[in-house]
Each structure stands twice: as structure tokens, then as C-alpha cells.
Image (cartoon, rainbow, N blue to C red):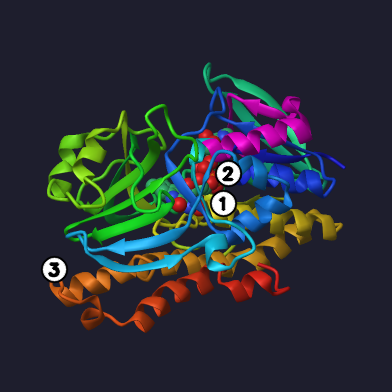
């Protein structure tokens, strides 16, 4: 069998390399960055995805770097507690929720790929420019990222575009689609070595997008010599202007610190945390309309290339991991590659389209929107008078069901 060609060594590309290897199918990975190193900051990996990473034998490697997230905690912008709930194993799942540096996750996946598929099958500095197909396979064209010159075309049985939100493979399939859609929310992110707050394993969402929202959580289980943890934070609010999304775009303190200047709580001094970051990155919150198809003959899409979603449900990387499992299973089960890619699309397209839409409307932070609206953005006396526990539960559980990490979906035999 000809090798399967994977474009992109992000979470999606590296995970599908591992699931294909597990299924006995040879593959090669091509990444445009001259050196594969983790970009971005903290992300959360929810139990539906940690289940799959554990099945790939990676739970211990992840647990050795990541924080096993204990609880989700919601506050208003005055630092008043709205709601908290246990997460991962603490909520009775058989798998943990991890809060992890995206670079650490990528490093664990890359190391596993090097050991299992071989370092010589992972190419960096190869920028994919186009994929062609015929009855017997695919031919993928590349330029050298640094020199810009054409590299030798690569033959394979199938090509999987795991090349992220600005995917060239998606662009080739949908040339008229246009740029990612801006949600109106801009994000500023950083990571700061800081003393532990709350349980030391808490995932905090606070405030609301109209007057400023923060997401704050620790991402490494190792502490520094002063006992501090690496804390990832995101400040986000409605902002008319934005710049193209790039994992590496630098942000500036002056553009957003004013919104959080008064956020000095007994559980955390937020402006001091922000000011303590070594670097600040800026991203617009963007997604795309769900596509009608991902698979065209021997070409398909996976992860953000297939279904970019606004990061309000901690789910984009998790869904890329689920895609990777489904795609390898379909390729292993179907003799005809084009049939396999169609079957993969049938398993994953509607499920991910629902999450893209749900992330726009009612992700878990909808709790904060409700409290913001009902209190008129003022402090409350008693949260039970604002929103009932049942409503709060319905909002978080409703999202878990659509995103496929409610306990029932995870323990049933239904394929994700
Ligand atoms: C602010 C923010 C917070 C997030 N938080 C979470 C979270 O908590 N939990 C979660 O699950 N998800 C989260 N996500 C989403 C998650 O990061 C993405 O869904 C995930 O990284 C997608 O992985 P991917 O492999 O599909 O794409 P990417 O990670 O973007 O990887 C694509 C790879 O392809 C390479 N590439 C691009 N073009 C080419 C080319 N032409 N040729 C060769 N290689 C190419 C890129 O260099 C890159 O390495 C968040 C996203 C953002 C922006």
C-alpha cells in the first residue's frame, strides 16, 4: 500500500499519524514550519479526547507534564462565585481532563510519532501548495518553506489536509469560500509563573464578553523554585478591529489591560497576573460555516482544516483527535480509499458542524452571559435568586452532550 500523506504536524496531523500507525497503515507527515515546535498557550483536553489519547498509550506522558483539571469555576467580573462543578476523573469519568500547554501536547505527540512511525517520515520545512489525484493515488506538491523553491512531488494513496484554519487543501476544494469569519471577539493570551490559586487545579471563566471576560488555569504540574505554577490566561471582549489569526502574533498590553484593571479579587490579582507574563499573543475568535463535504475522492480534511470553531468550548483539538480515530478506523475497514474517506465524513461531519454552531450560541460560558444579562452587569446578593442550579447544570450538560463528552456518550458503544 502507498503511504498516506498527512499535511500539517499540529495536534490533528500528529494524532492521525499515530492512529494510522496503530491500524498498520504507513504514513508520512509534512509540516511547513522549518522546526516543529509547539506554538500557542494553554488548552484543555476533555475526557472524550483523553480517552483516545489514553488508548494510544499517551496518558502517562501527558500526566507527567499537564495539570489534571479538578473543577470548572465561574465568576462574575466582581469576583463573585456563580457556579462550580467537578471535571474529568473528579467528576466520575474514567479519563482525566488535562489543562496543558499546547506545545507540551504537541511535543508528546511528536515524540510518540518519532518513536513509532520514525523521524525520517516527518518532514519539516515542506509547505504544501496543492494536491492532485488520479485513479491510483495522489500527487502532492510542495515548496521549500525557507527557499520558496519547488520540492519533489510526493505520491501517496490518500492525502489528509490537517493544515489548520488557513488550510491550502480546503482552499483548493473551496476556492471561493473567503477568509475565516470574525465573531467580533478578540483575545489576548499569555502565561505567567504565579502562586497557585483556588485548588491549584481549577479552570476559571469570569466576566462576560460585553465588559470583559477572562479564562485562567494552570497548565503545568511542575512548579518553579519559588513554588509557582505556569498559569495560562485569556482576556477577551468585543472589539471591532482584528488581525488575521496566527499562532504567533504578538499582542500589546495597552490594547486590553484597561478592561481588567479592577479585577483584584481575594482569590487572584488578575491585572498583576497579566502584567507578569513574558509574552502576550493576540488572536481573533474566528470560525467558518460548516462545509457540505470534506472528502473528494482520495483527498480529505481533518481538524481545524475541516471544522474550525470559535474556542469557547475547549474542543477544537479534542475534535481533531476524534477525527483522527474515526479516519484511521474507516481506512482500515474499507478497501477502497475513496469509500473510506466518505465513510469518515459521514461519521464526523454532522457531529462537528453541531459543535461549530453550538460554540457560537451556547458554549459552557453561556452561564456567564445569563448572569450578565439578569443582573444588568451588577454584583448580586444571592446567586440562587439570579439563576437556579438546574439551569446552570442544563447549560453545561447540554454542551457536553452536543460535544460528545457527557458520560453516557463516552461509555456507550456508539461511534463518535
Ligand atoms: C485561543 C485558543 C484557545 C483554544 N483552546 C482550546 C482548548 O482548550 N481545547 C481544545 O481542544 N482546543 C482549543 N483550541 C483549538 C485548538 O487549538 C485547535 O482546534 C487545534 O490546534 C487544531 O489542530 P489542527 O492540527 O487541526 O490545526 P493546527 O494546530 O493549526 O495545526 C496545523 C498545522 O499545519 C501546518 N500547516 C499549515 N499550512 C501548511 C501547509 N501549507 N503545508 C504544510 N503544513 C502546513 C501548520 O504549521 C500547523 O503545524 C483553541 C484555539 C485557540 C485559538
Q: Spot the residue most to the top.
A: 147
| Numbered disc in front, either 2 or 3 | 3
Q: Main secondary structure of the magenta part?
A: helix
Ligand 1 under 8 Å from disc 2 Cβ? yes
Question: Left or right of 286: which side holds 301?
Answer: right
Give the residue number, with chain letter if any, for mark 2: 11
Q: Quadrant of the C terminus?
A: bottom right
345 in relation to 284, above or below: below
Question: Which label's residue is closer to the chain start, 3 or 1?
Answer: 1
Question: Left or right of 306: which side holds 1?
Answer: right
**Residue 320, position in %: x, y?**
58, 53
| Numbered disc in front, either 1 or 2 | 2
Ligand 1 under 8 Å from disc 3 Cβ? no
Give the residue number, with chain letter if any, for mark 1: 303
The one nearer the camera, 206 or 347, is 206
- Count of residue discs: 3
- Can residue 310 be seen here? The reply is yes
Question: Which label's residue is closer to the chain start, 1 or 2?
Answer: 2
Give the residue displayed 60% in from the left and 43% down from the top. Answer: 62
Ligand 1 under 8 Å from disc 1 Cβ? yes
**Residue 60, position in %: x, y?**
66, 44
Q: Which quarter of the picture shows residue 115?
A: top right
- Can residue 245 be seen here? The reply is no
Range drawn in magenta = 104-131
Give the residue displayed 62% in from the left and 37% down from the top. Answer: 108
Question: Which label's residue is closer to the chain start, 2 or 3?
Answer: 2
Mark 1–mark 2 distance (CA, rounded to whole Å): 8 Å
Question: Left or right of 329: which side holds 244?
Answer: left
Give the residue number, with chain letter if any, for mark 3: 379
Q: Which quarter of the picture shows residue 141?
A: top right
Amino acid at each position: 500500500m502507498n503511504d498516506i500523506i498527512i499535511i500539517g504536524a499540529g495536534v490533528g496531523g500528529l494524532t492521525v499519524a499515530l492512529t494510522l500507525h496503530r491500524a498498520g497503515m504507513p504514513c508520512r507527515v509534512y509540516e511547513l514550519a522549518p522546526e516543529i515546535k509547539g506554538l500557542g498557550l494553554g488548552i484543555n483536553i476533555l475526557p472524550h479526547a483523553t480517552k483516545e489519547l489514553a488508548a494510544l498509550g499517551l496518558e502517562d506522558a501527558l500526566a507527567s507534564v499537564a495539570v489534571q483539571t479538578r473543577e470548572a469555576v465561574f465568576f462574575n467580573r466582581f469576583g463573585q462565585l456563580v457556579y462550580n462543578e467537578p471535571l474529568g476523573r473528579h467528576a466520575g469519568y474514567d479519563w482525566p481532563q488535562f489543562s496543558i500547554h499546547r506545545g507540551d501536547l504537541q511535543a508528546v505527540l511528536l515524540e510518540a510519532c518519532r518513536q513509532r512511525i520514525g523521524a525520517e517520515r516527518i518532514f519539516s520545512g515542506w509547505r504544501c501548495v496543492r494536491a492532485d489525484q488520479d485513479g491510483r493515488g495522489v500527487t502532492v506538491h510542495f515548496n521549500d518553506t525557507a527557499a520558496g523553491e519547488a520540492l519533489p512531488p510526493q505520491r501517496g494513496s490518500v492525502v489528509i489536509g490537517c493544515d489548520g484554519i488557513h488550510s491550502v487543501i480546503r482552499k483548493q476544494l473551496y476556492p471561493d469560500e473567503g477568509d475565516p469569519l470574525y465573531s467580533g471577539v478578540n483575545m489576548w493570551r499569555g502565561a505567567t509563573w504565579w502562586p497557585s490559586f483556588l485548588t491549584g487545579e481549577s479552570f476559571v471563566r469570569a466576566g462576560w464578553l460585553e465588559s470583559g471576560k477572562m479564562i485562567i488555569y494552570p497548565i503545568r504540574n511542575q512548579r518553579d523554585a519559588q513554588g509557582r505554577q505556569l498559569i495560562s490566561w485569556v482576556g477577551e471582549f468585543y472589539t471591532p478591529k482584528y488581525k488575521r489569526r496566527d499562532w504567533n502574533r504578538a499582542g500589546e498590553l495597552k490594547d486590553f489591560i484597561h478592561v481588567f484593571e479592577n479585577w483584584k479579587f481575594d482569590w487572584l490579582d488578575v491585572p498583576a497576573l497579566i502584567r507578569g507574563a513574558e509574552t502576550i499573543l493576540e488572536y481573533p475568535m474566528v470560525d467558518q460555516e460548516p462545509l457540505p463535504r470534506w472528502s473528494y475522492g482520495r483527498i480529505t480534511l481533518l481538524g481545524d482544516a475541516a471544522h474550525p470553531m470559535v474556542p469557547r468550548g475547549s474542543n477544537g483539538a479534542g475534535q481533531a483527535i476524534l477525527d483522527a480515530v474515526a479516519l484511521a478506523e474507516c481506512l482500515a475497514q474499507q478497501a477502497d480509499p475513496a469509500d473510506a474517506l466518505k465513510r469518515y465524513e459521514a461519521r464526523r461531519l454532522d457531529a462537528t458542524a453541531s459543535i461549530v454552531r453550538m460554540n457560537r450560541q451556547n458554549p459552557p460560558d453561556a452561564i456567564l452571559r445569563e448572569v450578565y444579562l439578569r443582573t444588568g452587569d451588577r454584583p448580586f446578593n444571592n446567586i440562587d435568586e439570579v439563576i437556579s442550579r438546574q439551569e446552570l447544570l442544563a447549560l453545561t450538560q447540554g454542551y457536553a452532550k452536543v460535544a460528545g463528552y457527557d458520560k453516557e456518550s463516552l461509555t456507550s458503544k456508539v461511534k463518535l
